[in-house]
Amino acid sequence: MYKASYKPYQLKFNEPGGTSRGVLTTKMSYFIEITHQDRPGIKGIGECSILPGLSPDDSPQLEDKLQWCCNNINTIAENFHKHLMEWPAIRFAIEMALLDFQNGGNKIWFPSDFTNSKKQIKINGLIWMGSIKEMHRRIKEKTEAGFDCLKMKIGALDFDKEFELLASIRERFAPDELEIRVDANGAYTAKQAESVLKRLESLHIHSIEQPIKAGQWEEMSVLCKNAPIPIALDEELIGVNDPLERKRMLEIIRPRYIILKPSLTGGFKSSENWIDWAHTLNIDWWVTSALESNIGLNAIAQWTATLNNPLPQGLGTGQVFTNNLDAPLRVENGHLIYQKPDSGY
């Protein structure tokens, strides 16, 4: 018989995390722990990471649902994806905890050359929104740290000022020296997005994430068809759970990329379903964290390493919290490295 419990943990940002949806100073995660009477001493851990206003699980009923899952873990363990279809962050946490338990409770979810410290994951450097001065400082820090791919949040400031900032970066770094991705978090109307995309083309921007709000499939389809720079779907994937509905959406919109956040797309297996559909339509993808603690980030990184995607991944968020939890991860020269611990952590 399985036993499960959960506990909340509030993560605190080093600096306010600014997006077009607002500014974050803290965020909640909930850790699910699973044990089994037949394997005493082994504990699996999973993280339910909540992004306020974005996670479908961000609900007043969240803790009641977590407790229900713990009370009924033996009933749902074999088919938790079906039982928790509308709760992607909890699905991910349970999938993660069960996988950790099954692998011996050592926080090795996906053994590979990455967890043997023989392989690194190329990642982008994330630049949060802030004042122009703050963003210049953050860009300088990331480029000096060896990143050759930056992801910039846009859509909250005056676009002329954001454009000037991006132009100043491009003046210093040619496209073959520095890849620039931008993330609008649905900040623009379709008409505004057309203008923004045209201006960004001159700066050789790699891609723009979610230029308009999710749910406008026809408008997004037109943007993708006519866009002078590639469009990546991010929030668009949230809440689309039926496999055939996923296929239909991708066939209608035809983006250049999709971005997978397991805490928002329902875990590893569910995210791999998105990848399978994307491959059938020649759509590329990469993986991004959803501001998990180092525990969830470690599991996502291990999974990502097994997928052998050469694009820079969005997994450089381990240093954004003042009270993050321990994990054998470090960032060096724009790469995420698993530093094999001498003992457990």
Image: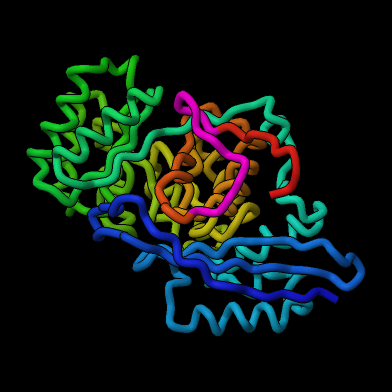
31 shown above or below 17 = below
The image shows residue 243 at horizontal and vertical percentages of 57, 58
Q: Is residue 241 or residue 43 the one in the foreground?
A: 43
At 69% from the left and 68% from the top, the residue drawn is: 33
Whether residue 241 is visible here, answered yes or no, is yes
At 20% from the left and 28% from the top, the residue drawn is: 201
Q: Is residue 6 or residue 151 the one in the foreground?
A: 6
Image quadrant assignment for residue 178: top left
At 21% from the left and 17% from the top, the residue drawn is: 172
The image shows residue 72 at horizontal and vertical percentages of 72, 82
Q: Residue 113 in magenta?
A: no
250 shown above or below 263 = above
In the picture, the quarter occupied by the N terminus is bottom right
The image shows residue 236 at horizontal and vertical percentages of 39, 55
Image quadrant assignment for residue 308: top right
137 shown above or below 287 = above
Farthest-out residue, right: 38
Image quadrant assignment for residue 149: top left
91 shown above or below 274 = below
Q: Residue 331 in magenta?
A: yes
At 28% from the left and 39% from the top, the residue drawn is: 152
Image-based side of 142 in relation to 155, left or right: right
- Specify the segment rendered in magenta: 324-336
